Image (spheres, rainbow, N blue to C red):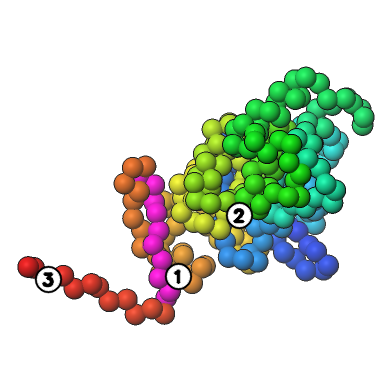
Amino acid sequence: MRIDIEDLSVEVAGARLVQDIRLHAAPGQVVGLVGPNGSGKSSLLRCVYRALRPAAGAVRLDGEDLHGMDAQAGARLLAALPQESSAEFDFSVAEVVAMGRLPHRRGAIGRASAEDGRICERALDRVGATHLTDRSFLTLSGGEKQRVLVARALAQQPRVLVLDEPTNHLDIAQQLEVLALVRSLGPTVLVALHDLNLAARHCDVLYVIAGGRIVASGPPHDVLSPDLLAEIFGVRAHRVRHPRTGAVQLLFDRLTDDVRPIEQTNR
C-alpha cells in the first residue's frame, strides 16, 4: 500500500512541531525517519497513526485520506507501535496480542474466532515470545514487552506498519531479528530510528528531519554523508561498507575530538 504525506504540518499548544512535510513510500518499502531528538519524528508518526490531527496537509493510503476514514476501517489497514506504550490493567500477554484482532471483528463485542487465535499464536512465535503467552504483561522486562507489542501489531495484519523506535529495550540480536522480521512481512513500513547503522542496513529510503522539516531524502548510502551528519547531528562520521551486506555503516567521533592516526611500525 502506498503512503503519501502531503504538505503536513502539526501544531501542539500553539507550537508548530512539523512543517510542510512531504514524504512518499511505495508499496512494500521500508522508509526510515532519522534526526536529532526533538526534530519532529514522533510528532509526524503520531499524525500518521491518528493520535494527532494535522494542522494542515494530509496522510493518504493509496490516495484515500486516512483521517477521513472510519476508525475501524483505518485500523484494518494500519497498525502502529508507538515509542511509549503503557498498560493500565493487568492483561495477560495473550490478551494484549489478541487486541490486534479487534479491528477485524464484527461489532464492538464480536467474539474471537479460532482463526484469530491461530493468527495471534503465529505472531507470538514470529517474535520468539510464545513462552510468554500466559504471563502478566506488567511483569515483563522492557525487551519482552517490546516483543509482545510487535506481536500485537503483526496480529493486526496491517498493510501499513508505523514503528516509533521499535528497537527500544531490545538487545543487539533482538534488534536485528525484529527489523529483519518486519521487512520480511511485506507491508509498507514507516519507522523512526535513532541508530543510523540500523537505519542504513534495513531501510530502502531515509528521510532526515531537523527542526520539523525534511532536510534530505534518498537511499541510505546517498543521504548519510559526512557533511550532512556533521551539520545535523554534530558528529564526524567515517563511512565503511559492511563486509557481508555491503550496506553503509558509520563510525563516529565528536567534531571537537583531535583524532590522530595510529602510527604503524615495521618489525
172 over 150 or under it: above or below: below
Residue at horizontal 73%, vertical 41%?
135
Q: Earlier in the sequence, mark 1 or mark 2?
A: 2
Q: Nearer the viewer, residue 260 or 4?
A: 260
SS for tag 3?
A: loop
Residue 265, disc:
3
Quadrant for the N terminus in the image: top right
50 in relation to 18, above or below: above
Mark 3 or 1, nearer chain start: 1
The residue to which callout 2 is attached is 169
Measured as percent of width and height from the top left, residue 37 is found at 62, 66
Whether residue 116 is in magenta: the answer is no
Q: Position of residue 6 (x, y in %)?
A: 69, 48
Kind of residue at disc 2: His
- Mark 1: which amino acid? Val
The residue that appears at 83% across and 47% down in the rendered structure is 90
